[in-house]
Amino acid sequence: MMGKPKRNQRSLGDRLFHWLTVFLLVFFAVVMVAPFVWLVSSSLKTQLNIFQYPPEFLPDPWMPQNYINAMTYKPFGLYFRNTLLVAGLNVLAVVFTSSFCAYGFARMRFPGRDLWFGIVMATLFLPYAILLVPSFIVFSRLGWVDTFLPLVVPQFFGGGAFNIFLMRQFFRTIPEEICDAARIDGCSEFGVYWRIMLPLSKPALITIGIFTFLFAWNDLIGPMTYLRSPDNFTIAVGLASFRSQTDIHWDLQLAASAAVTLPVIAIFFLSQRYFIQGVVMTGLKG
């Protein structure tokens, strides 16, 4: 008889914890989604209604032509093409080179392996702005300014310390016996990497691909530094060009901002399962 209240107490506590968790998840989800919802709402307003007080959540009048005007005010078709080219090459470069470097740190034994891996990880502490000036000097002397080369070529040399770390951790979750069996069957070291490790690492590769695509899609500092011709502008530079010294077309800029986020949202939802799996499994083994 004394055990029933304890079970009921535990059951009540579990239910309270469950509903508290649901409440917190919903609360933080609303907090995260609210800015995007407000962006979409404001993109359908006139420029005067965007700044009216008290603010109105629903646009009145509705201005769906803001999207058409925004896409024609600037050549966003060209900006989309340039951004997709840069982002696609970055994804290809980072996914291949980071996984290749990570395989060496995870599976191959050579003198100073841990030391070199520590040096690679130490580069995470270098701010991007510190490397910007020397990188610009190098690319300027190479004659690469106002081309896509400074935005693409560096990605073919390692793919970044964070991506190497992510792939190394994922490779270490794959049993070594699988690689040993492939070597016994006559598979070369590159064959083990290409035929065994990469197919088993699809979640981590997709995760790195998403991160790389998002960085290239949203990057403003790099294109603003190296690109000069309007024909080479990316989406981020195109959005920044809505601002002038005398006026800012807020209605068009908000509409363009909402439009350029749609590909990112679509990519995330299409690859969400692999993204979460890659992040979760990366930390299973040290």
Image (cartoon, helix red, strand yellow):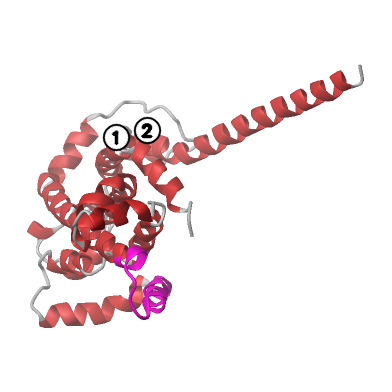
Residue 47 placement (x, y as % from top left) = 32, 40
Q: Would residue 95 be visible to someone looking at this image?
A: no
Name of the residue lying farthest toward the top: 1
Amino acid bearing label 1: Leu
Mark 1 = which residue? 270
Residues packed near mark 2 inside 10 Å, few (<14), some (14 to 19) or many (20 plus): many
Question: Which of 276/72 is in front?
Answer: 276
Q: Classify residue 89 by image quadrant.
A: bottom left
Outermost residue on the right side: it is 2
Q: Is residue 148 magenta?
A: no
Taking 12 as reference, is 51 above or below it? below
Front-most of residues 262 and 256: 262
Q: Position of residue 148 (x, y in %)?
A: 12, 64
Residue 142 picture location, percent across and down: 10, 80
Chief secondary structure of the magenta span? Answer: helix
From this view, report whether residue 239 is shown above or below residue 273: below
Residue furthest to the front: 184
| Residue under the point 51% across and 35% down | 30
Tag shown at residue 155: none
Front residue of 12/233: it is: 12
Q: Position of residue 112 (x, y in %)?
A: 37, 80
Comparing labels 1 and 2, the label whose residue is closer to the camera: 1
Q: Which residues are magenta?
A: 104-126
Query: Is residue 65 among the parts visible in the rendering?
Result: yes
The tag on residue 41 is 2
Please indicate whether residue 204 sits to the left or right of residue 87 in the image. right
SS class of the residue under badge 1?
Answer: helix
The answer to whether residue 22 is left or right of residue 237 is: right
Q: CA distance from mark 1 to mark 2?
A: 25 Å
Residue type, numbered disc 2 = Ser
